[in-house]
Image: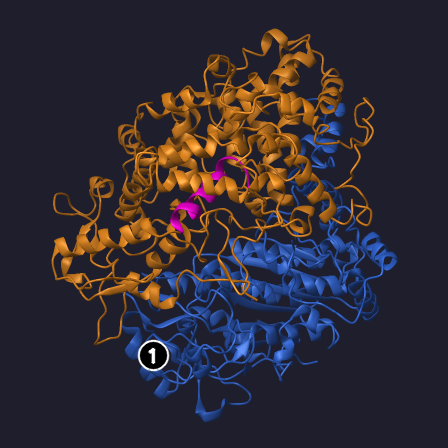
Chain colours: A orange, B blue
Amino acid sequence: MIRPSQPDIDSPDRPAHIDANVNPRLVKTHAPLAFAALLLSACGGGGGDSGGTTAATTPASPPPADVGAPAVESRPPAPPNPQTVAGASTTKFTSPANQTDVARFFSQATLGANRDQINAFGTSTYDAWLTSQFSQPLTQSHCSWMTANGYTSVANLFDGLDNSLWRKLISSPDTLRQRIVLALSEIFVVSANGITGYSPQLVVGHFVDLLEANAFGNFRTLLNDITLSPAMGTYLTYKGNVKSDVVNGSRPDENYARESMQLFTVGLYLLNPDGTPVLVNGAPVETYGPDDVTGLARVFTGWDLDTSNFPIDDPRVYQIPMVPRQKDFETGSKTFLGSTIEAGVQSAASCAACLSQALDILFNHPNTAPFFSRQLIQRLVTSNPSPAYVSRVAAAFRDNGAGVRGDMKAVIRQVLLDDEARSPVVSVAPGFGKLREPMVRFLNWARGFNVTSASNVWGVGDLSDTVTGIGQSPMRSPSVFNFFRPGYIPPQTAMGANGLVGAEFQITNESSLASYVNFMRRAVAGSGIDDVLPDYSSLMPIVADSSALLAELNTVIAAGQISTSNLALMKAALDTIPVTTPAGIRFRINASLVLIMSSPQYIVQK
Amino acid sequence: MVKETHHFPGLKPDNSARREFLRRTGAMSVLASATPWAATLAAMSEAAAQTATDYKAIVCIFLAGGNDHANTIVPYDDASYSTYSRLRGSIGLPLSSLTPTLLKPTIPLPGARTFALAPALSPLLPVFNAGDLNVLLNVGTLVQPLTKTQYTNKATRIPPKLFSHNDQQSYWQSSAPEGAMSGWGGRMGDLLGSANGTSSFTSVSVAGNAVYLSGQSTAPYQVSTSGPIPILGITSPLFGSTACSTLLSNLIRQPSNQLLESTHSAIGARTIDLYGQLSPALAGSSMTSTFPATPIGSQLAMVAKMIAARHALGTRRQIFYVQMGGFDTHENMGSVTGAHATLIGTVADAMASFHQAATDLGVSNQVTSFTASDFGRTLSINVGGSDHGWGSMHLLMGGAVSGKGFTGTAPVFADGGPDDIGQGRLVPTTSVDQLGATLGKWFGVSSTDLLYVMPNLANYSVKDLGFMKS
């Protein structure tokens, strides 16, 4: 009955390319074909019994070019000729071959890029671009901006937070950092929806500032900083947590102990270095049990807000780490995950030392590297990475090449430079890629077309609503389990039949799908989201030529992933919108963006 | 590959029957896997559907986060209350506050055990006294009957990942931890949905995707609290172009060999098609009962509207899912007033309104609601809150419920008592399997088919908890 949280999609019968990383030639030649064959054979013998709509083995006829015809799209493009591919580079994909490659890299490494940024990539290597991004300075912090713009109210308002989050996600030049921060915010989850008390938006803003500061740092420091943040202390309720009281039977709150293990570090099941579950007699092995939770909960006692310099309602209290409140510290020994922290004393130093030891145990646990690595891959590149890919990223986590564990730069490099991320051959396997999150799609457009807010208010607001918004908004997760779970399998799908997970499908349904399309329809037209407006000047010279317009959007927005036949359908439809007036010009641009951004070929990042 | 927990080894799949089943249920485009039980399912569905000529609905009201049962259904008899009061400290409800909502069932509990509704649940007291509300005692996730001793000895199967939110939510809804692909609501839909003119509305969520509603062939439909959402670029010309509107529709639903794209397209097709069916049906129906302007109130109002539209939709069996969050009360629970009282009070107000609406619509005997949650909580407290537990107390509501009563066994509230596995966490004495089976039997699922709905049911000697009148 026990099932792994990550379904065993990575079982030994996975296709050849997964185990073939020692042979780059094999990776780039036969593997995707084997993968495709496996998937197709697994879903009902080529789809005959299922009606053949999802798993046809032969490409369908090209759809008629007239607008509105049933458009059965045959994807992927014909698998590359092994001879051709074998003749290509057999080393890693170090540089883009064309601008589509640049755009595809940006779709994984950024929240969107405009034409100038794509052009500016030039002949750079991916690695050099990452290096330059790693040295990008931090821009004005959320807390600084909210303070400067008068959002320091102690009242329970989040408008300043939403504005500041959108401001940086849309416009901050450290584009890699912003993408990583958004990813980290979905692994180490704090939600504005669960923060009450003084200065709640500064509490959450400070947390995001910490993610920014640590995005290119070390995982261990990141773990320390979020653990001591007023945000996490509040959200997972260990701020003010006190030792057991033998008189009234109260116990330390187990909330952070449980979730920090389950979600932030070691996960539920013992993992191999490649992220697959360790199996004993065919069953996964639980990483920890209730006693471990109780043991670790004793560590997270005696921490509270630092009011030594400011009163409790001063906003500055919420922008500094929590400090020991030694009288509440559980001094007895703590046993969890097979380790024991010796008994301490009722002192601040002992309280802090105990916490440090506990975080070391979590950081150094063998699970942490593959557990975190797999999730970061899933946020950036693909929902179903091969075990070999996870293994390579986890190896970078364990050792950055200079003996340092937890170097985030090394981890990020491996996620984005790995052959499985970069290979244009791997990417056409029918199960590769990930659903772009609704908020990332919005940001793709916003960054693609230089969206600005003339008032500098950035009043996009909370987009969580599934009627008026897009069903998702940064730092607005419904719980610490994020908007969706990494192991979510959309039911009754060929994905499910093939054991493929797709986290983002957990928030995809008849309501959110419609509201997203409606929201983008308003956004691209520049109506309905305050003064947050795009700049389409780069499109003006080509708007009369629908093919050129679509080609540009296909690169800038969709990383070249809209098929030729769909582009033809779109051209025919767009040509019905005359561009003889300024309104017509704008209508054609708006419509082209809605068509592209509503297409599954765009919505699935490959 | 998909793993399933239930099989019907005596029956071999027959492809022609399976194709017919897929055709008839409209599942061809989404059900791509080879499902060995599909032919069996089709036959079961055929037989079950023939009996479903009336209308029945089951409504799952999920309290996400793990509701604190001890401050919801409060032990009242002297011995139990004494333990409760001592362990609960500042968050304990004073006895005097409970007296007005003391539950006086038609048949008293053994051992003179008594319980009171928390004061915030007082809107439901009249429903209880009218015989339309039953309290399910110490219910939780199990694989088979379990005693504290068996739990301690670790030799008896128990659900995986106890006390973990996401896994226990999943297990409550599906009998499997996170990653499960079908739940017991959806599996009932598999059996009975073909009675519906529009099987797409067999299982309906007003609260996001929930595994509870997914069956092997039953796909949940998601409706917002303001009804189905039109894609405005399709229902009207896209920036003035009907050609662009038509293409937009075709792109959103465009089939693909790319598996993620095809998954998204299937949802897109449903979005467009079902809006076209549901929108006029709702517009042509009337539901005038009032609901509180809360998220859970709005969700239950939409359920009532869809029930009101049952004739237009041709639905005879429906499973609904609504949800409210915020129940993970590790701190600041409060007592008679405060955070937890507000939470359960909000639920109670919405439930009372929903019961009235069902009465107004003339279907109170045909609509059965139940509450569910991740787990119960500890009886002992942290500072001002409680921690993750296991067994819990839940509510069953509707005219067909044998009300003004309790179901199951009252747990012993005592330190280290026979039901306490530590900190007042309860070993459930009634399982979700039994709950689902009892509801399923009322819904029209045959006793043999109940094993398909609740795969662990065979492990229990009592398969009908008796809380439904028929």
Could you say where residue A193 lies in the image, as x and y percent from the top left?
Answer: 40, 47
**In the rendered image, is residue A443 in sight?**
yes
Nearest the eye: A217 or A437: A217
Nearest the eye: A330 or B306: A330
Q: At 71% from the left edge and 56% from the top edge, which residue is drawn?
A: B218
Judge whether residue B389 is colored magenta. no
The chain to which mark 1 is attached is: B
Could you say where residue B33 lies in the image, as x and y percent from the top left?
Answer: 73, 52
Which residue does the numbered mark 1 point to in the structure image?
B84
Nearest the eye: B203 or A323: A323
**Does dot 1 land on a helix, a strand or a loop?**
helix
Q: At 22% from the left edge and 75% from the top edge, which residue is drawn?
A: A246
Q: Which residues are magenta?
A: A367-383
Asked which quadrant contains residue B328, the reply is: bottom left
What amino acid type is highlighted by mark number 1?
Tyr
Q: At 54% from the left edge and 34% from the top edge, which residue is drawn?
A: A420
Work out whether B437 lies above or below A482.
Answer: below
Nearest the eye: B415 or B346: B415
Work out whether A594 lies above or below A512.
Answer: above
